[in-house]
């Protein structure tokens, strides 16, 4: 699942006109890597929410900027799993 999320994130970033040709699993989303600004992070979060049926809060954006691609993908996977457990009850 995490690889599917990672692929979606990279294709979404490419569609947002970010150069992902040199992106690795350790590339930061924020200033030390892709340098996504808050609006771009929000756009990415909305697209991930729509694709995977999860939610991000505004408070999440600051910590998201500090994540690598793999950390973000793992966070999304964890939210999907948590959401699945919540709906199974």
Image (cartoon, rainbow, N blue to C red):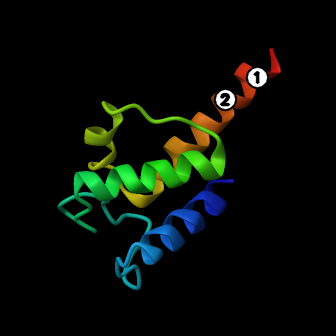
Q: Residues within 10 Å of mark 1 (few under 14, many from 20)?
A: few
Q: Is residue 42 above or below residue 87?
A: below
SS for callout 1: helix
Mark sitting on residue 27: none
Q: CA distance from mark 1 to mark 2?
A: 6 Å
Which percent across, then down, holds residue 70? Answer: 47, 56
- In the visual, does 65 lie left or right of 4? left
Which percent across, then down, holds residue 16? Answer: 40, 72
- In the visual, does 57 lie left or right of 63? right
- In the visual, does 27 lie left or right of 82? left
Which percent across, then down, holds residue 42? Answer: 36, 49
**What residue sits 28% from the left and 68% below the top?**
34
SS for callout 2: helix
Q: Among all residues in the image, which is located at the extreme bottom?
A: 21
Which percent across, then down, holds residue 48? Answer: 54, 51
Residue behind mark 1: 87
**What residue sits 76% from the left and 22% below the top?**
87
Q: Nearer the viewer, residue 19 or 68?
A: 19
Res. 63 image quadrant: top left
Residue behind mark 2: 83
Q: Is residue 12 above or below residue 59?
A: below
């Amino acid at each position: 699942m995490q690889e599917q999320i990672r692929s979606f994130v990279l294709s979404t970033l490419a569609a947002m006109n970010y150069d992902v040709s040199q992106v690795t699993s350790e590339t930061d989303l924020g200033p030390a890597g892709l340098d996504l600004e808050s609006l771009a992070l929000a756009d990415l979060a909305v697209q991930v929410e729509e694709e995977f049926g999860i939610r991000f809060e505004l408070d999440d954006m600051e910590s998201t900027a500090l994540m690598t691609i793999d950390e973000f993908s793992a966070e999304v996977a964890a939210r999907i799993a948590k959401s699945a457990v919540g709906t199974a009850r």
